[in-house]
Amino acid sequence: MKNLLYDINEKPKTLKEWVLYPLQMVSSCIVATILIANICGTPIDACLLGACLGTLTYQLITKGQSPMLISSCGATVSAVIGALAIGTAPNYLAVAIGGIVIAIVYGLLGLLIKIKGQDSFNKLFPPTIIGAITIVIGVNLAGFIPTYVQVNGEQSGIGVAIAIFVMFVVALSSHYFKGFWKTIPFLIGIFAGYIVSLILTISGVIPLIDIEAFKEISLFKIPQLTFMNWNFSELNWTTIGKVILLFVPVSLASAMEHCSDHKVLSNIIGTDLTKKPGLHKTLLGDGIASIIGSIVGGLPNTSYGEAIATIGFSRVASTIITTISALILGGLAFIEPVQVFFNSIPSCVFGGCAMILYGYIASSGLKTLLNNKVDLEDNKNLIIVSVILTVGVSGIWLFDNAFSGVSLAIVLGFILNQILHKKI
C-alpha cells in the first residue's frame, strides 16, 4: 500500500499542512503519554520532554528514514511501578537503570537480527510466547483500575460512574466519529470526563478538581526532570538485580511490539522499514530513546501505534512532520498552564480510558495468537500458553517477589519452548 500525500522525505507545501498535520499527530499521541505518566505517578512535563528527545534521537539514529513517533511505553508500566517502589519511593534511579536494561535487550536483539536474520529471533520468541505474555501484561494492568476510581483515597461510586462515562464516550467516539475526530477518542473522552468533574466540583457535589492549583501560575516553567531526584545511596547489586528481573521480560514484550509496529507502518507507507533503515537500527534508536526517557521523565519510550494510525489516516509519512510533532511535545513541557491542567485531571477520568487501553493490550496478545494461527490443539503450544497465563496472573514468585508475574512467566515460557519439541 502506497497512496501517500507525502512520502518519508517529502515536505508539506502549505502553511496549513505544516501546522495541522503535526497537531493531529500530537493530539493522537499525547493522551497515552499523559495517561501512562499519571498511572505511574511520574511528572507529565518531564515525560513530554522525554518523548520529544526520544523521538529526535530515534530520527537521528535511523537517519530520518522512519516517520515513527516515540513516547512513553505502556508495556513497561508494571516494571516502572515496581522500580519506583524499590527502597525510598519514588526511586527514579532504578527506573533509569531499567531504561539501560531495555536498551541492552534491544541492542542484543538488533545484533541478533542483523547477524542471523529475522527468523532466528522468531524461533527464540515465537508468537505463542509473545501473544500469551501480552495478554498477561494487559490483565495485570487491569488490577490497577480500582485505585484510579478512588476519590480521596477511598472507593467511590461517583469515581466509578465517571470512569464508566468516559469509557462510553471513548467507545462511541471511536466507533461512530469520522475523519480526524475518530483518531482522538481518548482525548475526547478525557475532555468530556473533565467537564463532568468540573461541574461536580463547582456545584459542590464532590471536590474532584483542585481549582486552587490554577491560581498564581506563570506561563513558563522548567520541567521536573527526574534525574534531579536520584538517590545514589540506595544503589546496590540487590536493587540492580530486582530492576533486571522487572525490566527484561517487559523489554522483550515491548520489543515484539516494536517489530510489529514497524511492520504495520511499512505496509502503510509502502517502504519496508525492517530493511531500510532496518530493524537493528530502529531497535537501537528505540532503546536509546528509552534511556533518555527514563533519565529525563522516569518512563521508558517506545514506538507509538497512535502515530501509525495518524499516518495511515492522513496519508502523510513525512519524517519532518514527526519531528515537528516531537518538538511540540517538548514545547508543551515548558508551558505551566498546560502542566497544571493535565495534573488536575482526576484519576477516575484516566480510569475510564484504562478500561479500554488495558483490555486493548490483552486483546492485542490474543490477536497475535490468532493472526499467527497458533494451534492450541498442539500440545506444546497449549502447555506454553497455559503456563504463561496462570503463572503470569497468579502472583507467585521465585527467590524474590521481583521475579514474579510477567518476569517468571516469560522465563518459564522460554524454557518450555526450548525443551518441548514437536512430536513426529
Image (cartoon, helix red, strand yellow):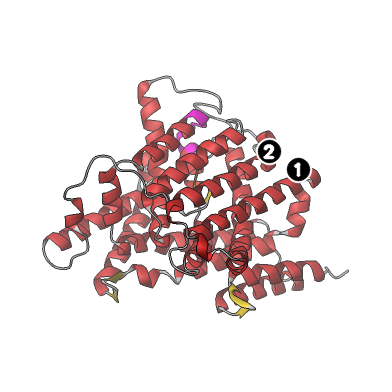
Q: In the rendered image, which quarter is residue 35 located in?
A: bottom left
Residue 293 place in picture, x, y as percent: 50, 48
* Contact (Cβ within 8 Å) of mark 2 with mark 1: yes
Towards the viewer: 343 or 233: 233
Q: In the rendered image, which quarter is residue 419 located in?
A: bottom right
* Membership of 148 in magenta stretch: no
Q: What is the span of residues highlighted in magenta in the rendered image?
A: 311-320
Whether residue 88 appears in this view of the structure is yes
Q: Secondary structure under badge 1?
A: helix
Residue 154 place in picture, x, y as percent: 29, 76
Q: CA distance from mark 2 to mark 1?
A: 8 Å
Q: Is residue 248 left or right of residue 78?
A: right
Give, as a three-letter code, the residue at label 1: Lys
Q: Main secondary structure of the magenta part?
A: helix
Residue highlighted by disc 2? 278
Q: Residue at x 59, y 55 (%)?
A: 254
* Membership of 317 in magenta stretch: yes
Residue 1 place in picture, x, y as percent: 59, 35
Residue 230 place in picture, x, y as percent: 47, 57
Towards the viewer: 130 or 222: 222
Sequence-first tag of 2 and 1: 1
Q: Residue furthest front?
A: 233
On residue 114, the disc is 1
Q: Residue at x 56, y 68 (%)?
A: 136
Q: Residue furthest left?
A: 203
Q: Residue furthest right?
A: 424
Give, as a three-letter code, the residue at label 2: Gly
Give the quadrant of the C terminus.
bottom right
Whether residue 404 appears in this view of the structure is no
Q: Secondary structure under badge 2?
A: helix
